[in-house]
Amino acid sequence: MHYVSTRGAATPLDFRAATLAGLASDGGLYVPEAWPTLSKREIAALAGLSYAETAVWVMTPFVGDALSQDELRTMCEAAYGRFSHAAVTPLKQLTHQHFLLELFHGPTLAFKDVALQFLGLLFERFLAGTDTHLTVIGATSGDTGSAAIDALAGRAGVDVFMLHPQGRVSDVQRRQMTTVLSPNVHNIAIEGDFDTAQALVKAMFNDRDFADRFTLSAVNSINWARLMAQVVYYFYAAVRLGAPERAVAFSVPTGNFGDVFAGYVAAQMGLPVARLIVATNVNDILHRALSTGDYSSAAVTPTAAPSMDIQVSSNFERLLFDLGARDGAALAAQMRGFETSRAMRLTDAHASGAAALFTSDAVDAADMAEAMRWACAETGELLDPHTAIGFAAARRAGLPADVPVVTLATAHPAKFRESVERATGLRPTLPNRVGDLFQREERYATLPATFDAVSGYIAERAVSAA
Ligand SMILES: *Cc1c(COP(=O)(O)O)cnc(C)c1O
């Protein structure tokens, strides 16, 4: 399997190279050259399999010959063995129609562990026996950072520099990053918002002088391998609800469009997906794009769901590429326009292609709190703010009563204790697996949001390319 850039100019790479590269050299994102498909019979055969085994079958066509199937199986068992629930991503029924897919049973309490625990092992495997030293640079609105740091701390051949927007992540999120004192982990608080931090990361990747001095890599959802690992739980959940005979809808709390794009990939692979509900908070660029065709970036409003406080959704580019007949040159021109004006119109092909599978909704603070209260009172479940936004959108999507609707529960409620307590009056307890988080020493640098400050800081500490 080869991977091509959404902007058409970078050389296609194999799975190993695409995993290590992250962003393509032309500024685009890697996608498989074609979508592999699973037949109805192959999907039906997933029904009784464990999560790790499901992962092997769903990921094999993407991995190609970069790993043997035994190696892939060993890695899936190791990655998913660290989850605290035997099902890894258990489904919980809330009402006749509504289900939660709990994706937060990993070490850092958010769904990003599902992909990053696996990605950490992939990096280690692909670097073993080479002289390459990877410099991972990422921006986080909270959960990617902690999951990436947990997955990469202490691993040989990798340094991780993680930028988070100062004061815009929860205490639990910050401490999960800053109390990891491994010498290969470098936390940076940026004096700016998440989009600013993400733009700094992109600028470093695109700066030839800087990028050529190090072997840069990404763990944000711009990394294809991360999305690939997320495709698995769409299959895992849907076969438990009757796929391939029955179509299932998913409601996905969305920020960078990574998680919901994995649902799109599952549908391209043959999984019967009735609908993908793109749930945003008031930072609603994706809702505006999908409902009116207007993809224009506004200022970010901080909310109780910080991992969705995003007004430029990197992975949307992957969807536009696929819906725009995979014309990389045309998309590159469109994205250059967007990068200058911060606004663009979807083409007719984009809009009609998206409408066939996606609906969208923007959920404000009051409706989010109401969803938390309703779930707590009617079903006894505490939902974190992100999940509550997905659930609010799921309930008002108006899907036929015979279509099961699965809301992706993307974070443990204890990761956002203040918001949950404010809405429901109940304070979720931190699971034992996070231990003495609030007693541990923190370490991080605080830097102004300028290219020179951040690239200079990293250049002083990163290992030069051989
Ligand atoms: C990252 C994150 C999201 C958004 O996921 P994307 O892949 O960026 O769309 C939603 N909820 C939580 C809890 C997250 O950590």
Image: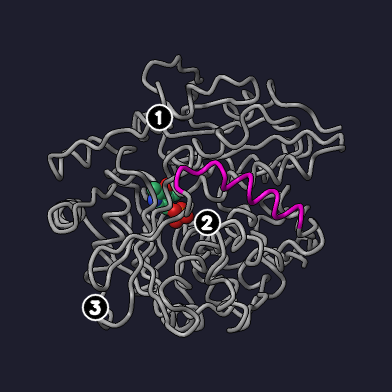
Within 8 Å of ligand 1, the CB of disc 1? no
Question: Disc 1 or 2, which lies upstream in sequence?
Answer: 1
Q: Is residue 80 magenta?
A: yes
Q: Is residue 362 magenta?
A: no
For the question of whether residue 410 can be seen, the reply is yes
Instruction: From the image, state whether disc 1 or disc 3 is nearer to you.
Output: 3
| Residue type marked 3 | Gly
Question: Disc 1 or 3, which lies upstream in sequence?
Answer: 1
Task: Locate residue 169 relative to residue 61 in the image: left or right.
Answer: left
Q: Secondary structure at mark 3?
A: loop
Quarter of image, res 362: bottom left
Q: Nearer the viewer, residue 88 or 288?
A: 88
**Residue numbers of the magenta segment:** 70-85
Image disc number at residue 166 = 1
Q: Which residue is mark 3?
A: 398
Find residue 395 and report its horizontal and vertical position in percent. Answer: 23, 69
Q: Residue at x 46, y 34 (%)?
A: 164
Q: Nearer the viewer, residue 125 or 226?
A: 125
**Cα distance between the residues tagged 1 and 2:** 21 Å
| Residue type marked 2 | Ser
Task: Locate residue 249 relative to residue 88 in the image: left or right.
Answer: left
Find residue 389 and report its horizontal and vertical position in percent. Answer: 28, 57
Query: Quadrant where the N terminus lies?
Result: bottom right
